Amino acid sequence: MKRIEGKTALVTGASRGIGRAIAIELAREGAQVAVNYASSEAKAKEVVAEIEKAGGSAFLVKANQAVAKEARAMVKEAAERMGHLDILVNNAGITRDALLPRMTDEQWVEVIQTNLNGCFFCTSAAVPIMAAQSYGRIVNVSSMNGQMPAMGQANYSASKGGIIAFTRTAAAELARYGITVNTVAPGFTETDMFAAVPPAIQAQIRSKIPAARFAHAEEIAKAVLWLVADGDYVTGQQINVNGGAFMP
């Protein structure tokens, strides 16, 4: 039997990168997966097709999680189509990098709205559903850059650090309902977003990682899988998947 056979999951930002890997991994282990995207419909369809080709079950749910009404409607739609909602992975996120003296209000607000507020919108919509069934697994994807300084990413770091703090409080409040809430904090990971970093800078970053390489998205997905499949007594915690680049 697969590890999460019969479970249902919603993964935000699942059209590419870490979200894509998470959606595929959860489906591979038996979950029915709602694959969220905001604009990359073609990429999201590829994820669903890959899951179905492997014998899994998945469908698309379009929503911009930065918009409260869209985020909450997405959670409701996913739960109704699957009959229940067991797992929520808040993965969707954006960057709008700039050094602090040059960062605009729009760059700050857009990142906080999507990364942090979006996490709250989706979680708050899922809580009543999960509480009613006395079961839920929520995993919030933060970042190593929410734990340490990240030049040019004051907005991103604040949003990801906020997710870590939010996770702890949510875990304390929701444990009584059978809901666990945890964070996975990836280090530098081979994704489309990171591919935009100039090669020379990538080489500098790699030289400071004890494991001497960047993470594969699939490695982040396996940490998420462990939390939802085996982490029944784990809540309010963060799993750092960073190759030793940051050791708190």
Image (cartoon, helix red, strand yellow):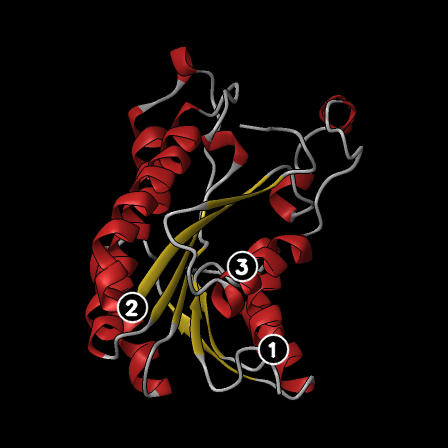
Q: Amino acid at mark 2?
A: Gly
Query: For the point 37% across and 29% down, which residue is it?
Result: 158
Give amino acid for label 3: Val
**207 shown above or below 180:** above
Q: Residue at x 40, y 73 (%)?
A: 61
Residue 188: x %, y % from top left: 64, 37
Mark 2 is surrounded, within 10 Å at the Cα level, by few (under 14), some (14 to 19) or many (20 or more) other residues, namely: some
Q: Say the numbered circle drawn on residue 224.
A: 3
Kindly identify which numbered label has been placed on residue 29: 1
Q: Quadrant of residue 135?
A: bottom left
Q: Is residue 82 left or right of residue 71?
A: right
How far separated are the C-alphas under marks 3 and 1? 12 Å
Residue 62 point in image, percent of width and height? 39, 69
For discs 2 and 1, the disc positioned in front in the rendered view: 2
Decide if residue 66 is in sight here.
no
Place of residue 189 in the rendered image (x, y in percent of width and height, measured from the top left): 66, 43
